[in-house]
C-alpha cells in the first residue's frame, strides 16, 4: 500500500500569484497568510534543512497549491498537510490552525513526525 504525504500551500498557481506572494512575503512577512511557506522557504528557494527533512521521510511527498488540490471544495482553510493512502483515502493530519501556530522549522518537523506516529499507532 503506497502512501503519499501532501503539503498543500495557502497559495494559488500562476505567475501573477507567485509574484504577489513573493512580494508579500518580502515586504510584510508577519502578515503573510501561509505559515507553511514562511517556515519552509527562504526568499527565493526551499530551505536546505527542509529539503533534507522531506527527502528523509519514508513516504512519497507532494507539494500542491490550494487550487490544485482535488479536495479543495471540501476545505477552506489552508495550509494543511494530508496523507493519501493506497486506497486513495485522504486524511488531513495537520490543519491550518495547527500549522499557523508553529514558530519554527524545527517545530514543524517535530509536529509532522508526531502526526505520522499517531497515524501508524
Image (spheres, helix red, strand yellow):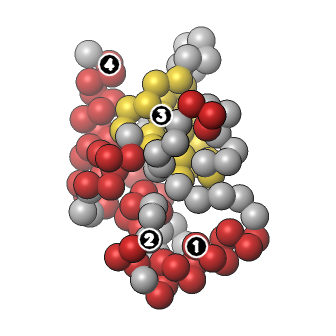
Question: Residue 31 at what x, y percent from top left?
Answer: 39, 74
Q: CA distance from mark 3 to mark 1?
A: 23 Å
Identified at 38% across, 32% down, the residue is 93
Image position of 51 with respect to 32: above or below:
above
Q: Nearer the viewer, residue 78 or 63?
A: 78
Per the image, label 2 sits on a secondary structure element best described as loop
Question: Residue 67 at what x, y percent from top left?
Answer: 67, 48
Eye-nearest disc, 4 or 3: 3
Per the image, label 4 sits on a secondary structure element best described as helix
**What residue sits right under mark 3 in the picture?**
82
**What residue sits right under mark 1 in the picture?**
21
On-image quarter of the N terminus: top right
Image position of 14 with respect to 116: above or below:
below
Q: CA distance from mark 2 to mark 1?
A: 8 Å
Per the image, label 3 sits on a secondary structure element best described as strand
Within 10 Å of disc 1 (Cα), the crowding (few <14, some 14-19, many 20+) is: some
Eye-nearest disc, 2 or 4: 2
**What residue sits right under mark 2 in the picture?**
32
Q: Is residue 108 left or right of residue 28?
A: left
Tag of residue 120: 4
Q: Is residue 46 left or right of residue 119?
A: right
Specify which label sits upstream in the sequence, 4 or 3.
3
Q: CA distance from mark 1 to mark 4?
A: 35 Å
Eye-nearest disc, 2 or 3: 2
Residue 49 visible? The answer is no
Per the image, label 1 sits on a secondary structure element best described as helix
Residue 87 sits in which quadrant? top right
Residue 23 visible? The answer is yes
Q: CA distance from mark 4 to mark 3?
A: 14 Å
Amino acid at each position: 500500500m503506497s502512501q503519499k504525504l501532501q503539503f498543500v500551500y495557502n497559495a494559488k498557481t500562476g505567475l501573477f500569484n507567485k509574484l504577489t506572494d513573493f512580494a508579500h512575503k518580502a515586504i510584510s512577512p508577519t502578515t503573510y497568510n501561509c505559515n507553511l511557506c514562511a517556515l519552509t522557504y527562504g526568499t527565493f528557494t526551499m530551505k536546505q534543512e527542509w529539503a533534507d527533512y522531506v527527502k528523509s521521510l519514508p513516504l512519497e511527498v507532494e507539494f500542491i497549491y490550494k487550487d490544485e488540490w482535488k479536495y479543495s471544495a471540501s476545505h477552506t482553510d489552508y495550509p494543511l498537510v494530508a496523507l493519501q493512502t493506497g486506497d486513495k483515502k485522504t486524511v488531513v493530519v495537520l490543519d491550518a490552525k495547527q500549522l499557523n501556530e508553529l514558530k519554527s522549522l524545527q517545530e514543524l518537523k517535530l509536529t509532522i513526525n508526531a502526526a505520522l506516529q499517531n497515524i501508524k499507532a
